[in-house]
């Protein structure tokens, strides 16, 4: 996503530069400090737009027809190619102050992945010149990919994978290219639809009818410096996962869809992770999202969330840029229902506490009733939300306090999140007192210095009560209290605003037997409380064979620890540890 947005910004800057060059490309009349475009100069400007901004050759631009009119102080130039009189471009100039008001193309789009007409036309022009659609074979497929890579264009997953397949047709490649540029066909401007049809007619290609996703297992082999196999499946299970999915907690669940990547580990690599994947399963209307990972030759399954997918949906899971090593661990989950259309969630799996979990990086969807498009993405613990009104094609962006939207999938309720995007103000949020701060992997010191006694390392996501601050060399020192413990933490590892970031989730634990919570790890430590088997808690610190924990007052251990909970030390062999209560339930089931 970051690389793609940088490319988008680069294209925008290039377009701005192109417009700037247009202003200097030809002389204009100067009067009263303003630049005035005379009729000939208006035509020259329009032709320059065609070549510098919209991607036409000089020969094509010279063949265009031009029509000039003036009305209410505005000069309008309409221009079109004689072979395509319905594809009309428009440039407008102010007759009052001489400014260029606009240059509009019939091929413009508000689609978030739109690369710009210059890029689209550049690729299609080379495809035509080299007769790739006529002589469609392995070399043509490879060349198509090379042209897109040279332009910095990001194809969608279907196009990228299709170009590796011997059965991928020219019409499939053409359609997937237009979808990559303009979104689904119903989003295309009329001129784009006609442009696509022109290619089909010119090269005698058959229009592709929408089809249901094919059931079964499909594999793609990638041979480069990182050899790997991509496996996608829909209402089918790859043979290597059949036994893995016979987990006792998956009894009665069936596979809906999934994808996984297997790497050929080199002898000189330090990595032990040979593969990973994401699977959606269903049991009647219920849905569960699970991860699989492969260490050496053994696969294992781990639950991620039972609330990240809505009941009754039919999700399709693919890879983001699946043939790219850079995006090897990014998944796209697509689904829709009566309320939301074209929902696409970008999910990134991570390993925590030696178990797989995942967080939501971005999500886009269309409200089924209003047709308003929404897109959210996580950026340095800030949720950015953009909306596009289909009537006005206007885009609005805003930042959200992302503690209203937990991005860790074990705590994400997808329905609540989508409703929050539509009306952020109406969503109830968790509010902490102003004295609460979040610590992230920081040492708790006895005094405000790194040379002071180390009382232990607080795990990321620990909530501490701020008692005061002291000046430090690189950052302030915070005087804090965390239940029974008191000390100082460096401000380098402190966030004063609790937010649902991907680094702010403490491990959770469940007692596997009746246990005693004590004040310290000493032999004769005073008792804090008796804890029954099955009690959940958050782990704040690990010290030898002890955990310093916080037991919430009136609820199960969730996303955040309870600052007002019960604190103490518990023996490590008396609890089972995981990323979420769902994972712990599975672990306990495995041990029975």
Image (spheres, rainbow, N blue to C red):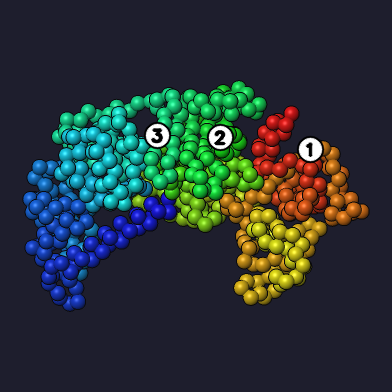
Residue 568 location (% of width, % of height): 81, 52
Mark positioned earlier in the residue sequence (2 or 3): 3
- Vertical comparison of 183 with 48: above or below: above
Label 3 element class: strand
Q: Quickly name the residue at label 3.
A: 220
Q: Is residue 461 visible?
A: yes
Residue 479 location (% of width, % of height): 73, 68
Q: Is residue 74 visible?
A: no
Residue 210 location (% of width, % of height): 33, 28
The quarter of the picture where the C terminus appears is top right
Q: Quickly name the residue at label 2.
A: 297
Q: Residue furthest bottom?
A: 32
- Vertical comparison of 298 with 251: above or below: below
State the residue at coordinates (70%, 50%): 561
- Vertical comparison of 171 with 510: above or below: above
State the residue at coordinates (73%, 71%): 451
* Numbered label attached to residue 269: none
Q: Nearer the viewer, mark 1 or mark 3?
A: 3
Can you tell which quarter of the image residue 521 is in? Answer: bottom right
Q: How many numbered discs sit on the rendered protein?
A: 3
Label 1 to label 3, Cα distance in Å?
Answer: 44 Å
561 lies left or right of 307:
right
Residue nearer the viewer, 418 or 18: 18
Mark positioned earlier in the residue sequence (2 or 1): 2
CB-based contact (under 8 Å), mark 1 and mark 3: no
Residue nearer the viewer, 189 or 468: 468
407 lies left or right of 16:
right
**Circle 1: is it few (<14), some (14-19), or many (20+) Cα within 10 Å?**
some
Can you tell which quarter of the image residue 124 is in? Answer: top left
* Numbered label attached to residue 512: 1
């Amino acid at each position: 996503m970051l690389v793609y947005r940088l490319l988008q910004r680069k294209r925008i800057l290039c377009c701005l530069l192109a417009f700037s060059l247009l202003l200097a490309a030809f002389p204009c009349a100067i009067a009263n400090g303003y630049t005035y475009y005379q009729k000939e100069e208006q035509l020259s400007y329009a032709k320059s737009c065609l070549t510098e901004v919209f991607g036409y050759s000089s020969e094509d631009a010279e063949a265009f027809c031009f029509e000039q009119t003036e009305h209410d102080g505005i000069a309008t130039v309409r221009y079109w190619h004689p072979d395509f009189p319905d594809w009309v471009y428009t440039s407008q100039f102010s007759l009052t102050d001489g400014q260029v008001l606009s240059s509009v193309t019939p091929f413009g789009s508000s689609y978030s992945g739109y690369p710009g007409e210059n890029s689209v036309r550049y690729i299609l022009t080379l495809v035509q010149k080299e007769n790739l659609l006529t002589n469609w074979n392995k070399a043509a497929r490879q060349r198509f990919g090379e042209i897109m890579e040279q332009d910095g264009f990001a194809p969608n997953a279907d196009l990228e994978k299709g170009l590796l397949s011997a059965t991928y047709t020219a019409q499939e490649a053409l359609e997937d290219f237009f979808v990559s540029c303009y979104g689904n066909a119903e989003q295309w401007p009329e001129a784009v639809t006609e442009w696509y049809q022109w290619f089909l007619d010119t090269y005698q290609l058959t229009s592709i009818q929408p089809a249901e996703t094919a059931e079964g297992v499909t594999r793609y082999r990638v041979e480069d410096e990182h050899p790997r196999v991509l496996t996608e499946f829909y209402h089918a299970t790859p043979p290597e996962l059949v036994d893995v999915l016979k987990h006792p907690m998956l009894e009665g669940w069936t596979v809906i869809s999934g994808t996984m990547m297997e790497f050929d580990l080199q002898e000189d690599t330090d990595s032990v992770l040979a593969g990973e994947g994401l699977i959606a399963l269903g049991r009647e209307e219920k849905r569960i999202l699970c991860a699989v990972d492969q260490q050496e030759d053994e696969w294992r399954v781990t639950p991620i969330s039972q609330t990240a997918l809505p009941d009754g949906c039919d999700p399709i899971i693919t890879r983001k840029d699946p043939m790219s090593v850079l995006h090897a661990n990014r998944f796209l989950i697509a689904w829709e229902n009566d309320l939301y259309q074209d929902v696409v969630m970008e999910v990134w799996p991570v390993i925590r506490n030696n178990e797989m979990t995942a967080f939501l990086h971005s999500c886009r969807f269309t409200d089924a009733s209003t047709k308003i498009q929404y897109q959210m993405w996580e950026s340095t613990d800030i949720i950015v939300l953009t909306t596009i009104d289909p009537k006005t094609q206007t885009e609005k962006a805003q930042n959200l306090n992302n503690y209203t939207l937990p991005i860790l999938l074990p705590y994400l309720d997808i329905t609540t999140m989508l409703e929050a995007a539509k009306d952020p103000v109406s969503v109830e949020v968790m509010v902490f007192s102003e004295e609460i701060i979040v610590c992230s992997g920081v040492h708790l010191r006895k005094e405000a210095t790194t040379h002071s006694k180390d009382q232990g390392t607080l795990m990321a996501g620990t909530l501490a009560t701020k008692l005061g601050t002291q000046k430090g060399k690189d950052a302030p020192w915070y005087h804090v209290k965390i239940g029974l413990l008191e000390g100082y933490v460096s401000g380098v590892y402190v966030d004063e605003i609790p937010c649902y970031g991907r680094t702010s989730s403490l491990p959770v634990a469940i007692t596997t037997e009746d246990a005693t919570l004590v004040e310290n790890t000493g032999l004769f430590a005073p008792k804090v409380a008796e804890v029954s088997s099955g009690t959940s808690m958050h782990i704040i610190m690990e010290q030898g064979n002890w955990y310093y924990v916080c037991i919430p007052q009136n609820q199960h251990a969730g996303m955040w620890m309870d600052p007002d909970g019960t604190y103490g030390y518990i023996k490590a062999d008396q609890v089972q540890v995981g990323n979420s209560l769902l994972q712990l339930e599975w672990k306990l089931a495995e041990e029975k």
